[in-house]
């Protein structure tokens, strides 16, 4: 089992920056693919960024070049540095980890970008 806890959301003006963190805890918490998804009101949840166990990163086209995902050495904490934020980045951001037998999600953290 894995528990995910996100932090770092908030309100920021367009063009500003925020940093999200996600801590994975539990006996299977380390060394898995971890990533971020987001869901805006009325929209489906969408992929934002991910980091694989070997350190390879993936980004959606909408955040490429503005967001950076990173992971600690222990492999159980990921961060999402979000720069040049836009109003359309407003959403609830969810942390996700992928285990061989299933996916786990955090409770989400709200990011609001005012224009």
Image (cartoon, grey):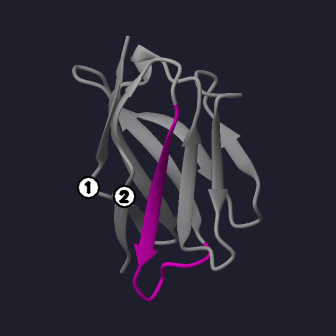
The numbered mark, 2 or 1, whose residue comes first in the sequence reads 2
Q: Which residue is located at x 29 percent, y 49 percent?
A: 108
What percent of the width, then of the height, locates residue 77? Answer: 53, 68
Q: Is residue 87 visible?
A: yes
Instruction: Tell me, for residue 107, which label it has, or none.
Output: 1
Say if the magenta span includes residue 27. yes
Q: Quadrant of residue 53?
A: bottom right
Above or below 47: residue 20: below
Q: Is residue 45 visible?
A: no
Tag in front: 2 or 1: 2
Q: Which residue is located at x 53 percent, y 19 percent?
A: 15
Q: Quadrant of residue 62?
A: top right
Residue that sits furthest to the bottom in the current view:
27
Front in this rendered view, residue 36 or 102? 36
Front in this rendered view, residue 72 or 45? 72
**Range of residues picked out in magenta:** 17-31
Q: Which residue is located at x 53 percent, y 52 percent?
A: 35
Residue on which disc 2 sits: 6
Q: CA distance from mark 2 to mark 1?
A: 7 Å
What percent of the width, then of the height, locates residue 6? Answer: 36, 58
């Amino acid at each position: 089992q894995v528990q995910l806890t996100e932090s770092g959301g908030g309100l920021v003006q367009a063009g500003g920056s925020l940093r999200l963190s996600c801590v994975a805890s539990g006996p299977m918490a380390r060394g898995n693919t971890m990533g971020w998804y987001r869901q805006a009101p009325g929209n489906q949840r969408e992929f934002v960024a991910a980091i694989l166990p070997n350190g390879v990163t993936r980004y959606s086209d909408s955040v490429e070049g503005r967001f950076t995902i990173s992971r600690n050495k222990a492999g159980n904490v990921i961060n999402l540095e979000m720069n040049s934020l836009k109003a359309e980045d407003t959403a609830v951001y969810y942390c996700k980890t992928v285990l061989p037998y299933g996916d786990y999600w955090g409770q989400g953290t709200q990011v609001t970008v005012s224009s």
